[in-house]
Amino acid sequence: MLKLSRMGLVLMCVFSQVNHAEEDTWPVQPLSARDQLEQQFSDDILQQKKARQWVHEVANNIAAIRYVDQLADLYQSIGFVPLWQDTFTASDFEQQLRMVVLSNISSDFNRRYSLLKHYKQANDWRQYDLLATDTLFAYMSYVEGIPSYGRGWLFGAGVDPQLPVPSQASLSRLYNAIDTERLRFYVNSLKPDDENYTRLMLAIDALEPAASGDWPGFYQPGIIRLGTRLRDPDALITILERLGDLRDFEADQIRAAGVRTYNVDLANAVKSFQRRHGLKEDGVIGPQTRQWLAISPRSRIRVLALNAQRTRLWPADAASLLVVNIPNYALSLWLNDRHVLDSKVIVGRPSRRTPLLTTNVSSVVFNPYWNVPMSIMRKDILPKAQRDRGYLHRNGFAVIRSWQSSEQIPIHTIDWRIVNAKSFPYRLRQKPGRKNALGRFKFNMPNDHAIYLHDTPAKSLFAKETRAFSSGCVRVEQADNLAMILLNHSGVPERRVNELKSRTKTKTVGLSNKVKVQVIYQTAWVDSDGLVNYRNDVYDYDKFVAMSQNQELFTSLYSE
Protein backbone atom coordinates (compact mmCIF):
# COMPACT_ATOMS: atom_id res chain seq x y z
CA MET A 1 0.00 0.00 0.00
CA LEU A 2 1.75 3.07 -1.28
CA LYS A 3 0.28 5.70 1.03
CA LEU A 4 0.41 3.55 4.14
CA SER A 5 3.99 2.49 3.48
CA ARG A 6 5.08 6.14 3.30
CA MET A 7 3.21 6.86 6.52
CA GLY A 8 4.76 3.83 8.16
CA LEU A 9 8.24 5.12 7.38
CA VAL A 10 7.38 8.50 8.91
CA LEU A 11 5.97 6.86 12.05
CA MET A 12 9.05 4.68 12.43
CA CYS A 13 11.27 7.75 12.35
CA VAL A 14 9.04 9.59 14.83
CA PHE A 15 8.88 6.61 17.20
CA SER A 16 12.67 6.35 17.02
CA GLN A 17 13.01 10.01 17.99
CA VAL A 18 10.51 9.54 20.82
CA ASN A 19 12.41 6.55 22.23
CA HIS A 20 15.72 8.44 22.19
CA ALA A 21 14.06 11.35 23.91
CA GLU A 22 12.72 9.03 26.62
CA GLU A 23 16.19 7.62 27.26
CA ASP A 24 17.88 11.03 27.52
CA THR A 25 15.23 13.40 28.85
CA TRP A 26 12.31 11.27 30.06
CA PRO A 27 10.64 14.03 32.10
CA VAL A 28 10.73 16.47 29.12
CA GLN A 29 8.79 14.25 26.65
CA PRO A 30 5.11 14.20 27.61
CA LEU A 31 3.34 10.87 27.30
CA SER A 32 0.44 12.53 25.44
CA ALA A 33 2.63 13.04 22.32
CA ARG A 34 3.18 9.33 22.02
CA ASP A 35 -0.50 8.69 22.59
CA GLN A 36 -1.32 11.10 19.77
CA LEU A 37 1.00 9.25 17.38
CA GLU A 38 -0.50 5.91 18.30
CA GLN A 39 -3.99 7.32 17.83
CA GLN A 40 -3.04 8.70 14.41
CA PHE A 41 -1.63 5.33 13.43
CA SER A 42 -4.83 3.59 14.57
CA ASP A 43 -6.94 6.07 12.63
CA ASP A 44 -4.94 5.42 9.49
CA ILE A 45 -5.33 1.66 9.89
CA LEU A 46 -9.07 2.15 10.35
CA GLN A 47 -9.32 4.35 7.26
CA GLN A 48 -7.41 1.79 5.24
CA LYS A 49 -9.75 -0.94 6.47
CA LYS A 50 -12.75 1.16 5.48
CA ALA A 51 -11.20 1.80 2.06
CA ARG A 52 -10.74 -1.93 1.53
CA GLN A 53 -14.33 -2.52 2.57
CA TRP A 54 -15.46 0.13 0.07
CA VAL A 55 -13.52 -1.66 -2.71
CA HIS A 56 -15.19 -4.98 -1.87
CA GLU A 57 -18.64 -3.37 -1.82
CA VAL A 58 -18.18 -1.61 -5.16
CA ALA A 59 -16.52 -4.66 -6.74
CA ASN A 60 -19.56 -6.76 -5.81
CA ASN A 61 -17.69 -10.01 -6.44
CA ILE A 62 -16.01 -8.98 -9.71
CA ALA A 63 -13.77 -12.01 -10.18
CA ALA A 64 -11.18 -10.04 -12.16
CA ILE A 65 -10.38 -7.64 -9.27
CA ARG A 66 -6.94 -8.50 -7.94
CA TYR A 67 -5.12 -5.45 -6.52
CA VAL A 68 -7.41 -4.65 -3.58
CA ASP A 69 -4.81 -2.91 -1.40
CA GLN A 70 -3.63 -0.70 -4.25
CA LEU A 71 -7.23 0.17 -5.18
CA ALA A 72 -8.04 1.06 -1.57
CA ASP A 73 -4.96 3.24 -1.29
CA LEU A 74 -5.57 5.09 -4.57
CA TYR A 75 -9.28 5.77 -4.18
CA GLN A 76 -8.81 6.84 -0.56
CA SER A 77 -6.16 9.33 -1.71
CA ILE A 78 -8.53 10.91 -4.30
CA GLY A 79 -11.54 10.98 -1.98
CA PHE A 80 -13.35 8.02 -3.61
CA VAL A 81 -14.23 10.00 -6.74
CA PRO A 82 -14.19 8.33 -10.20
CA LEU A 83 -10.77 8.14 -11.80
CA TRP A 84 -11.89 7.65 -15.43
CA GLN A 85 -14.11 10.69 -15.92
CA ASP A 86 -12.11 11.87 -18.95
CA THR A 87 -13.54 9.88 -21.87
CA PHE A 88 -10.44 10.50 -23.99
CA THR A 89 -8.23 8.86 -21.34
CA ALA A 90 -10.61 5.93 -20.97
CA SER A 91 -10.80 5.45 -24.75
CA ASP A 92 -7.03 5.50 -25.10
CA PHE A 93 -6.69 2.88 -22.39
CA GLU A 94 -9.40 0.70 -23.93
CA GLN A 95 -7.66 0.92 -27.30
CA GLN A 96 -4.38 -0.28 -25.78
CA LEU A 97 -6.18 -3.14 -24.05
CA ARG A 98 -7.90 -4.02 -27.30
CA MET A 99 -4.53 -4.49 -29.01
CA VAL A 100 -3.48 -6.93 -26.29
CA VAL A 101 -6.82 -8.75 -26.53
CA LEU A 102 -6.58 -9.06 -30.32
CA SER A 103 -3.12 -10.58 -29.96
CA ASN A 104 -4.68 -13.26 -27.70
CA ILE A 105 -1.65 -13.55 -25.42
CA SER A 106 -3.59 -13.22 -22.15
CA SER A 107 -6.86 -14.81 -21.07
CA ASP A 108 -6.89 -12.44 -18.09
CA PHE A 109 -6.81 -9.29 -20.24
CA ASN A 110 -9.40 -10.85 -22.56
CA ARG A 111 -11.77 -11.32 -19.62
CA ARG A 112 -11.09 -7.86 -18.21
CA TYR A 113 -11.72 -6.15 -21.56
CA SER A 114 -14.98 -8.04 -22.04
CA LEU A 115 -16.18 -7.03 -18.56
CA LEU A 116 -15.26 -3.39 -19.12
CA LYS A 117 -17.31 -3.30 -22.34
CA HIS A 118 -20.20 -4.95 -20.48
CA TYR A 119 -20.18 -2.39 -17.63
CA LYS A 120 -19.88 0.45 -20.14
CA GLN A 121 -22.90 -0.74 -22.12
CA ALA A 122 -24.85 -1.25 -18.88
CA ASN A 123 -23.93 2.28 -17.66
CA ASP A 124 -22.52 0.69 -14.49
CA TRP A 125 -19.88 3.35 -14.07
CA ARG A 126 -18.82 2.53 -10.48
CA GLN A 127 -17.86 -1.02 -11.38
CA TYR A 128 -16.39 0.13 -14.69
CA ASP A 129 -14.20 2.68 -12.87
CA LEU A 130 -12.96 0.19 -10.27
CA LEU A 131 -12.24 -2.55 -12.82
CA ALA A 132 -10.53 -0.10 -15.19
CA THR A 133 -8.19 0.99 -12.40
CA ASP A 134 -7.47 -2.60 -11.35
CA THR A 135 -6.81 -3.42 -15.02
CA LEU A 136 -4.51 -0.41 -15.23
CA PHE A 137 -2.41 -1.92 -12.43
CA ALA A 138 -2.26 -5.23 -14.34
CA TYR A 139 -1.35 -3.45 -17.57
CA MET A 140 1.38 -1.44 -15.84
CA SER A 141 2.81 -4.71 -14.53
CA TYR A 142 2.65 -6.22 -18.03
CA VAL A 143 4.49 -3.26 -19.58
CA GLU A 144 7.13 -3.37 -16.83
CA GLY A 145 7.65 -7.10 -17.31
CA ILE A 146 8.17 -7.01 -21.09
CA PRO A 147 11.98 -6.41 -20.98
CA SER A 148 12.50 -9.41 -18.69
CA TYR A 149 9.73 -11.79 -19.72
CA GLY A 150 8.56 -10.60 -23.15
CA ARG A 151 10.66 -13.11 -25.06
CA GLY A 152 8.61 -15.83 -23.43
CA TRP A 153 5.24 -14.09 -23.21
CA LEU A 154 5.15 -13.02 -26.87
CA PHE A 155 6.69 -16.14 -28.41
CA GLY A 156 4.52 -19.04 -27.36
CA ALA A 157 4.19 -18.92 -23.57
CA GLY A 158 1.49 -16.26 -23.20
CA VAL A 159 1.26 -13.77 -20.34
CA ASP A 160 1.05 -15.01 -16.75
CA PRO A 161 -2.53 -14.34 -15.53
CA GLN A 162 -1.20 -13.58 -12.01
CA LEU A 163 0.92 -10.52 -12.75
CA PRO A 164 2.57 -8.98 -9.68
CA VAL A 165 1.84 -5.55 -8.24
CA PRO A 166 3.54 -2.80 -10.29
CA SER A 167 6.80 -1.53 -8.86
CA GLN A 168 6.88 1.29 -6.33
CA ALA A 169 8.50 3.56 -8.94
CA SER A 170 5.72 2.85 -11.41
CA LEU A 171 3.02 3.48 -8.81
CA SER A 172 4.71 6.75 -7.84
CA ARG A 173 4.59 7.92 -11.46
CA LEU A 174 0.89 7.07 -11.60
CA TYR A 175 0.16 8.96 -8.35
CA ASN A 176 2.11 11.95 -9.61
CA ALA A 177 0.16 11.91 -12.89
CA ILE A 178 -3.13 11.87 -10.98
CA ASP A 179 -2.00 14.63 -8.60
CA THR A 180 -0.99 16.86 -11.53
CA GLU A 181 -4.06 15.97 -13.61
CA ARG A 182 -1.94 14.29 -16.28
CA LEU A 183 -3.43 10.80 -16.20
CA ARG A 184 -4.17 10.99 -19.92
CA PHE A 185 -0.48 11.55 -20.68
CA TYR A 186 0.54 8.75 -18.33
CA VAL A 187 -1.82 6.25 -19.99
CA ASN A 188 -0.59 7.30 -23.43
CA SER A 189 3.01 6.69 -22.32
CA LEU A 190 2.25 3.00 -21.70
CA LYS A 191 1.98 2.15 -25.40
CA PRO A 192 5.11 1.72 -27.52
CA ASP A 193 6.57 4.99 -28.75
CA ASP A 194 7.22 3.38 -32.12
CA GLU A 195 5.84 4.20 -35.55
CA ASN A 196 5.70 0.48 -36.37
CA TYR A 197 3.16 0.00 -33.57
CA THR A 198 1.05 2.87 -34.89
CA ARG A 199 1.19 1.53 -38.45
CA LEU A 200 0.08 -1.91 -37.28
CA MET A 201 -2.84 -0.37 -35.37
CA LEU A 202 -3.96 1.45 -38.52
CA ALA A 203 -3.59 -1.75 -40.56
CA ILE A 204 -5.89 -3.54 -38.11
CA ASP A 205 -8.46 -0.76 -38.35
CA ALA A 206 -8.39 -1.01 -42.15
CA LEU A 207 -8.81 -4.79 -42.09
CA GLU A 208 -11.63 -4.99 -39.55
CA PRO A 209 -14.49 -4.28 -42.02
CA ALA A 210 -13.39 -7.34 -44.02
CA ALA A 211 -13.26 -9.41 -40.82
CA SER A 212 -16.84 -8.61 -39.87
CA GLY A 213 -18.39 -10.49 -42.82
CA ASP A 214 -18.05 -13.89 -44.44
CA TRP A 215 -14.70 -14.65 -46.04
CA PRO A 216 -14.88 -16.26 -49.48
CA GLY A 217 -13.08 -19.53 -50.00
CA PHE A 218 -10.85 -20.05 -53.03
CA TYR A 219 -10.37 -23.79 -53.31
CA GLN A 220 -9.23 -24.45 -56.88
CA PRO A 221 -6.42 -27.05 -56.87
CA GLY A 222 -3.50 -27.33 -59.24
CA ILE A 223 -1.20 -24.66 -60.64
CA ILE A 224 -3.05 -21.59 -61.93
CA ARG A 225 -1.28 -19.70 -64.72
CA LEU A 226 -2.36 -17.15 -67.32
CA GLY A 227 -5.25 -18.55 -69.31
CA THR A 228 -6.33 -21.11 -66.67
CA ARG A 229 -10.12 -21.26 -66.38
CA LEU A 230 -11.26 -20.24 -62.88
CA ARG A 231 -13.90 -22.23 -61.03
CA ASP A 232 -14.89 -19.26 -58.87
CA PRO A 233 -13.33 -16.03 -60.19
CA ASP A 234 -15.42 -13.82 -57.88
CA ALA A 235 -13.91 -15.46 -54.78
CA LEU A 236 -10.38 -14.67 -55.98
CA ILE A 237 -11.37 -11.13 -57.02
CA THR A 238 -13.03 -10.47 -53.63
CA ILE A 239 -10.04 -11.74 -51.62
CA LEU A 240 -7.57 -9.61 -53.57
CA GLU A 241 -9.89 -6.61 -53.32
CA ARG A 242 -10.47 -6.85 -49.56
CA LEU A 243 -6.76 -7.32 -48.87
CA GLY A 244 -5.88 -4.26 -50.97
CA ASP A 245 -4.09 -5.92 -53.89
CA LEU A 246 -6.94 -4.97 -56.24
CA ARG A 247 -8.42 -1.49 -56.02
CA ASP A 248 -12.20 -1.26 -55.85
CA PHE A 249 -12.65 0.12 -59.36
CA GLU A 250 -10.31 -2.53 -60.79
CA ALA A 251 -12.30 -5.30 -59.14
CA ASP A 252 -15.54 -3.80 -60.45
CA GLN A 253 -14.14 -3.64 -63.98
CA ILE A 254 -13.05 -7.29 -63.91
CA ARG A 255 -16.46 -8.38 -62.62
CA ALA A 256 -18.27 -6.25 -65.20
CA ALA A 257 -16.19 -7.83 -67.97
CA GLY A 258 -17.37 -11.28 -66.85
CA VAL A 259 -13.80 -12.61 -66.63
CA ARG A 260 -13.74 -16.42 -66.26
CA THR A 261 -10.05 -17.08 -66.90
CA TYR A 262 -6.93 -16.06 -65.02
CA ASN A 263 -5.80 -12.93 -66.86
CA VAL A 264 -3.04 -10.31 -66.66
CA ASP A 265 -4.99 -8.01 -64.31
CA LEU A 266 -5.48 -10.80 -61.79
CA ALA A 267 -1.89 -11.98 -62.19
CA ASN A 268 -0.57 -8.48 -61.42
CA ALA A 269 -2.73 -8.33 -58.30
CA VAL A 270 -1.41 -11.75 -57.27
CA LYS A 271 2.18 -10.53 -57.78
CA SER A 272 1.44 -7.69 -55.35
CA PHE A 273 -0.01 -10.23 -52.92
CA GLN A 274 3.04 -12.49 -53.30
CA ARG A 275 5.45 -9.61 -52.72
CA ARG A 276 3.74 -8.74 -49.44
CA HIS A 277 3.94 -12.36 -48.27
CA GLY A 278 7.59 -13.01 -49.13
CA LEU A 279 6.74 -15.34 -52.02
CA LYS A 280 8.23 -15.59 -55.48
CA GLU A 281 6.61 -12.83 -57.58
CA ASP A 282 5.68 -14.88 -60.61
CA GLY A 283 1.91 -14.33 -60.62
CA VAL A 284 1.38 -18.09 -60.57
CA ILE A 285 -1.00 -19.46 -57.92
CA GLY A 286 0.58 -22.58 -56.47
CA PRO A 287 0.26 -24.27 -53.04
CA GLN A 288 2.01 -21.53 -51.04
CA THR A 289 0.13 -18.62 -52.61
CA ARG A 290 -3.13 -20.53 -52.23
CA GLN A 291 -2.42 -21.15 -48.53
CA TRP A 292 -1.90 -17.44 -47.89
CA LEU A 293 -5.06 -16.58 -49.86
CA ALA A 294 -7.01 -18.86 -47.50
CA ILE A 295 -6.03 -17.01 -44.31
CA SER A 296 -8.98 -14.97 -43.08
CA PRO A 297 -8.86 -11.27 -42.06
CA ARG A 298 -9.62 -12.27 -38.47
CA SER A 299 -6.51 -14.46 -38.30
CA ARG A 300 -4.46 -11.73 -39.95
CA ILE A 301 -5.65 -9.22 -37.36
CA ARG A 302 -4.47 -11.50 -34.57
CA VAL A 303 -1.02 -11.73 -36.15
CA LEU A 304 -0.86 -7.96 -36.67
CA ALA A 305 -1.80 -7.32 -33.04
CA LEU A 306 0.71 -9.87 -31.77
CA ASN A 307 3.50 -8.28 -33.76
CA ALA A 308 2.41 -4.85 -32.51
CA GLN A 309 3.11 -6.09 -28.97
CA ARG A 310 6.48 -7.42 -30.11
CA THR A 311 7.56 -3.92 -31.10
CA ARG A 312 7.88 -3.26 -27.35
CA LEU A 313 10.95 -5.54 -27.34
CA TRP A 314 13.05 -3.85 -30.00
CA PRO A 315 12.48 -0.11 -30.30
CA ALA A 316 14.67 1.58 -32.93
CA ASP A 317 16.45 3.74 -30.36
CA ALA A 318 19.90 3.75 -31.97
CA ALA A 319 21.10 5.95 -34.82
CA SER A 320 23.26 3.07 -36.04
CA LEU A 321 21.43 -0.24 -36.05
CA LEU A 322 21.69 -3.64 -37.74
CA VAL A 323 18.43 -5.60 -37.75
CA VAL A 324 18.01 -9.26 -38.69
CA ASN A 325 14.37 -10.32 -39.01
CA ILE A 326 14.32 -14.11 -38.83
CA PRO A 327 10.98 -14.83 -40.61
CA ASN A 328 11.89 -12.37 -43.37
CA TYR A 329 15.35 -13.93 -43.88
CA ALA A 330 16.69 -10.41 -44.24
CA LEU A 331 19.21 -7.98 -42.76
CA SER A 332 18.97 -4.18 -42.82
CA LEU A 333 21.64 -1.73 -41.70
CA TRP A 334 21.26 1.93 -40.71
CA LEU A 335 24.23 4.18 -39.94
CA ASN A 336 23.61 7.61 -38.43
CA ASP A 337 19.89 7.24 -39.21
CA ARG A 338 20.61 6.52 -42.90
CA HIS A 339 19.63 3.22 -44.50
CA VAL A 340 22.79 1.85 -46.14
CA LEU A 341 22.37 -1.90 -46.77
CA ASP A 342 19.85 -4.69 -47.28
CA SER A 343 20.87 -8.31 -47.57
CA LYS A 344 19.32 -11.73 -47.70
CA VAL A 345 20.31 -14.00 -44.82
CA ILE A 346 20.11 -17.66 -43.88
CA VAL A 347 18.94 -18.38 -40.33
CA GLY A 348 18.76 -21.42 -38.06
CA ARG A 349 16.56 -24.31 -39.04
CA PRO A 350 13.54 -24.95 -36.75
CA SER A 351 15.44 -27.67 -34.88
CA ARG A 352 18.38 -25.27 -34.25
CA ARG A 353 16.76 -21.88 -33.93
CA THR A 354 18.57 -18.58 -34.18
CA PRO A 355 17.91 -16.89 -30.81
CA LEU A 356 16.51 -13.39 -30.39
CA LEU A 357 19.37 -11.07 -29.44
CA THR A 358 20.22 -7.49 -28.61
CA THR A 359 23.97 -6.96 -28.81
CA ASN A 360 26.51 -5.14 -31.02
CA VAL A 361 29.04 -5.92 -33.74
CA SER A 362 32.42 -5.67 -32.02
CA SER A 363 34.86 -6.82 -34.74
CA VAL A 364 35.29 -8.18 -38.25
CA VAL A 365 37.43 -11.26 -38.86
CA PHE A 366 39.03 -11.75 -42.29
CA ASN A 367 39.64 -15.36 -43.37
CA PRO A 368 38.36 -16.84 -40.10
CA TYR A 369 39.05 -20.29 -38.71
CA TRP A 370 35.90 -22.20 -37.81
CA ASN A 371 36.00 -23.72 -34.35
CA VAL A 372 33.24 -26.28 -34.79
CA PRO A 373 30.65 -26.26 -31.96
CA MET A 374 30.36 -29.58 -30.14
CA SER A 375 26.74 -30.14 -31.20
CA ILE A 376 27.55 -29.67 -34.89
CA MET A 377 30.67 -31.80 -34.62
CA ARG A 378 28.77 -34.70 -33.07
CA LYS A 379 25.56 -34.49 -35.11
CA ASP A 380 26.89 -33.49 -38.52
CA ILE A 381 30.61 -33.79 -39.13
CA LEU A 382 31.77 -36.90 -37.22
CA PRO A 383 29.14 -39.14 -38.87
CA LYS A 384 30.45 -37.97 -42.27
CA ALA A 385 34.05 -38.61 -41.17
CA GLN A 386 33.12 -42.16 -40.12
CA ARG A 387 31.53 -42.88 -43.51
CA ASP A 388 34.28 -41.17 -45.51
CA ARG A 389 37.80 -41.18 -44.04
CA GLY A 390 38.97 -38.53 -46.47
CA TYR A 391 36.18 -36.07 -45.59
CA LEU A 392 38.04 -34.12 -42.90
CA HIS A 393 41.22 -33.74 -44.94
CA ARG A 394 39.41 -32.68 -48.13
CA ASN A 395 37.46 -30.02 -46.28
CA GLY A 396 40.35 -28.55 -44.33
CA PHE A 397 39.48 -29.83 -40.85
CA ALA A 398 42.10 -30.38 -38.15
CA VAL A 399 41.61 -32.45 -35.01
CA ILE A 400 42.65 -30.42 -31.94
CA ARG A 401 43.49 -31.85 -28.51
CA SER A 402 40.98 -29.74 -26.53
CA TRP A 403 39.43 -26.29 -26.19
CA GLN A 404 42.31 -25.37 -23.88
CA SER A 405 44.99 -26.65 -26.27
CA SER A 406 46.00 -25.95 -29.88
CA GLU A 407 47.90 -29.25 -30.31
CA GLN A 408 46.84 -31.04 -33.49
CA ILE A 409 46.17 -34.77 -33.53
CA PRO A 410 47.09 -36.43 -36.86
CA ILE A 411 43.87 -37.54 -38.50
CA HIS A 412 45.37 -40.85 -39.67
CA THR A 413 46.15 -41.88 -36.07
CA ILE A 414 42.45 -42.04 -35.16
CA ASP A 415 40.59 -45.32 -35.74
CA TRP A 416 37.38 -43.85 -37.17
CA ARG A 417 35.68 -47.27 -37.16
CA ILE A 418 35.32 -47.19 -33.39
CA VAL A 419 34.80 -43.45 -32.88
CA ASN A 420 31.76 -42.62 -30.75
CA ALA A 421 30.46 -39.19 -31.66
CA LYS A 422 29.05 -38.58 -28.17
CA SER A 423 32.33 -39.36 -26.38
CA PHE A 424 34.83 -38.04 -28.97
CA PRO A 425 37.53 -36.43 -26.77
CA TYR A 426 38.83 -33.86 -29.27
CA ARG A 427 37.51 -30.80 -31.06
CA LEU A 428 37.53 -29.86 -34.74
CA ARG A 429 38.75 -26.70 -36.44
CA GLN A 430 38.40 -25.79 -40.11
CA LYS A 431 41.16 -23.72 -41.68
CA PRO A 432 40.43 -20.62 -43.76
CA GLY A 433 39.78 -21.14 -47.45
CA ARG A 434 37.10 -21.47 -50.08
CA LYS A 435 35.53 -24.48 -48.29
CA ASN A 436 35.44 -22.84 -44.87
CA ALA A 437 31.87 -22.81 -43.55
CA LEU A 438 32.23 -19.18 -42.39
CA GLY A 439 33.37 -17.97 -45.80
CA ARG A 440 35.73 -15.02 -45.88
CA PHE A 441 34.19 -12.88 -43.12
CA LYS A 442 32.99 -13.36 -39.59
CA PHE A 443 31.26 -10.62 -37.58
CA ASN A 444 31.72 -11.06 -33.84
CA MET A 445 28.80 -10.15 -31.55
CA PRO A 446 29.13 -10.65 -27.78
CA ASN A 447 26.29 -12.91 -26.55
CA ASP A 448 25.67 -15.98 -24.40
CA HIS A 449 24.65 -18.18 -27.35
CA ALA A 450 27.91 -18.07 -29.37
CA ILE A 451 25.92 -16.65 -32.30
CA TYR A 452 27.53 -14.47 -34.95
CA LEU A 453 27.04 -13.24 -38.51
CA HIS A 454 29.25 -14.70 -41.22
CA ASP A 455 29.85 -15.22 -44.91
CA THR A 456 29.27 -18.61 -46.56
CA PRO A 457 30.60 -20.52 -49.59
CA ALA A 458 27.09 -21.94 -50.24
CA LYS A 459 25.79 -18.91 -52.16
CA SER A 460 23.14 -20.88 -54.09
CA LEU A 461 20.96 -21.20 -50.97
CA PHE A 462 20.22 -17.46 -51.05
CA ALA A 463 18.10 -18.02 -54.16
CA LYS A 464 15.55 -20.02 -52.16
CA GLU A 465 12.42 -18.32 -50.76
CA THR A 466 12.64 -20.11 -47.39
CA ARG A 467 16.12 -19.87 -45.90
CA ALA A 468 16.16 -21.61 -42.52
CA PHE A 469 19.13 -23.92 -43.07
CA SER A 470 21.86 -23.00 -40.58
CA SER A 471 22.71 -24.38 -37.16
CA GLY A 472 21.84 -21.09 -35.47
CA CYS A 473 24.32 -18.50 -36.76
CA VAL A 474 23.27 -16.04 -39.46
CA ARG A 475 24.80 -16.30 -42.94
CA VAL A 476 24.89 -13.00 -44.84
CA GLU A 477 24.70 -12.83 -48.63
CA GLN A 478 26.23 -9.32 -48.75
CA ALA A 479 28.98 -10.14 -46.21
CA ASP A 480 31.65 -8.47 -48.37
CA ASN A 481 29.72 -5.17 -48.50
CA LEU A 482 28.79 -5.41 -44.82
CA ALA A 483 32.47 -5.72 -43.85
CA MET A 484 33.44 -2.73 -45.95
CA ILE A 485 30.62 -0.53 -44.61
CA LEU A 486 31.19 -1.38 -40.94
CA LEU A 487 34.96 -0.89 -41.17
CA ASN A 488 34.61 2.40 -43.06
CA HIS A 489 32.18 3.53 -40.35
CA SER A 490 34.93 2.87 -37.79
CA GLY A 491 37.50 4.87 -39.73
CA VAL A 492 39.26 2.05 -41.59
CA PRO A 493 39.87 3.33 -45.14
CA GLU A 494 38.66 1.39 -48.17
CA ARG A 495 42.24 0.83 -49.33
CA ARG A 496 43.13 -0.93 -46.08
CA VAL A 497 40.00 -3.10 -46.22
CA ASN A 498 40.81 -4.18 -49.80
CA GLU A 499 44.36 -4.98 -48.72
CA LEU A 500 43.11 -7.28 -45.93
CA LYS A 501 40.63 -8.93 -48.29
CA SER A 502 43.41 -9.74 -50.75
CA ARG A 503 45.36 -11.71 -48.15
CA THR A 504 44.83 -15.29 -46.96
CA LYS A 505 46.00 -14.64 -43.41
CA THR A 506 43.46 -14.49 -40.58
CA LYS A 507 43.07 -10.96 -39.24
CA THR A 508 40.64 -9.54 -36.66
CA VAL A 509 39.85 -5.82 -36.85
CA GLY A 510 38.01 -4.24 -33.93
CA LEU A 511 35.29 -1.67 -34.54
CA SER A 512 35.77 1.63 -32.72
CA ASN A 513 32.18 2.54 -33.62
CA LYS A 514 30.26 -0.52 -32.50
CA VAL A 515 26.89 -0.94 -34.20
CA LYS A 516 23.87 -2.14 -32.23
CA VAL A 517 22.38 -5.44 -33.42
CA GLN A 518 18.81 -6.65 -32.97
CA VAL A 519 17.91 -10.17 -34.07
CA ILE A 520 14.11 -9.98 -34.09
CA TYR A 521 11.10 -12.09 -35.02
CA GLN A 522 8.36 -10.16 -36.82
CA THR A 523 5.85 -12.16 -38.86
CA ALA A 524 3.90 -9.02 -39.83
CA TRP A 525 4.75 -5.35 -40.29
CA VAL A 526 3.86 -2.31 -42.39
CA ASP A 527 6.63 -1.16 -44.72
CA SER A 528 7.63 2.38 -45.67
CA ASP A 529 5.24 2.28 -48.64
CA GLY A 530 2.32 1.55 -46.32
CA LEU A 531 2.00 -2.08 -47.49
CA VAL A 532 1.16 -4.73 -44.89
CA ASN A 533 3.68 -7.58 -45.03
CA TYR A 534 3.26 -11.08 -43.64
CA ARG A 535 5.78 -13.90 -43.31
CA ASN A 536 5.56 -17.57 -42.48
CA ASP A 537 5.86 -18.42 -38.77
CA VAL A 538 8.99 -20.51 -39.31
CA TYR A 539 9.56 -21.27 -35.59
CA ASP A 540 5.85 -21.59 -34.65
CA TYR A 541 6.13 -18.68 -32.20
CA ASP A 542 2.65 -17.43 -33.16
CA LYS A 543 1.02 -20.70 -32.09
CA PHE A 544 -0.75 -19.39 -28.99
CA VAL A 545 -2.99 -17.30 -31.24
CA ALA A 546 -6.50 -18.76 -30.84
CA MET A 547 -6.10 -20.81 -34.00
CA SER A 548 -2.61 -21.16 -35.36
CA GLN A 549 -1.83 -20.27 -38.92
CA ASN A 550 -1.10 -23.88 -39.87
CA GLN A 551 -4.26 -25.20 -38.16
CA GLU A 552 -6.40 -22.72 -40.04
CA LEU A 553 -4.77 -23.61 -43.33
CA PHE A 554 -5.44 -27.31 -42.90
CA THR A 555 -9.06 -26.75 -41.91
CA SER A 556 -9.87 -24.33 -44.70
CA LEU A 557 -7.86 -25.49 -47.69
CA TYR A 558 -9.17 -27.70 -50.43
CA SER A 559 -7.61 -31.15 -50.08
CA GLU A 560 -5.57 -31.79 -53.17
Image: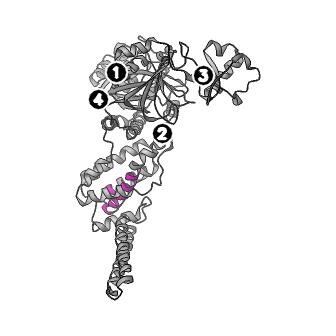
Q: Are marks 4 and 2 in contact (CB under 8 Å)?
A: no
Residue found 61% across the figure and 14% down from its top: 395
370 to the left or right of 36: right
Measured in 3D between alpha carbons, the distance from the residue under mark 3 to the one under mark 2, in whole angstroms, is 35 Å
Q: Residues within 10 Å of mark 4 (few under 14, many from 20)?
A: few
Would you say residue 124 sits in the magenta stretch? yes
Q: Earlier in the sequence, mark 2 or mark 1?
A: 2
Q: Closer to the N terminus: mark 3 or mark 2?
A: 2
Q: Which residue is mark 2?
A: 155
**Which residues, given as a range, are shown in magenta?**
117-141
Q: Quadrant of residue 42?
A: bottom left
Q: Residue at x 44, y 11 (%)?
A: 502
Position of 83 with respect to 225 (left or right) is: left
Q: Which residue is mark 4?
A: 337
Amino acid at pointer 3: Arg
Q: Earlier in the sequence, mark 4 or mark 1?
A: 4
Q: Which residue is mark 3?
A: 429
Mark 3 lies on a secondary structure that is strand
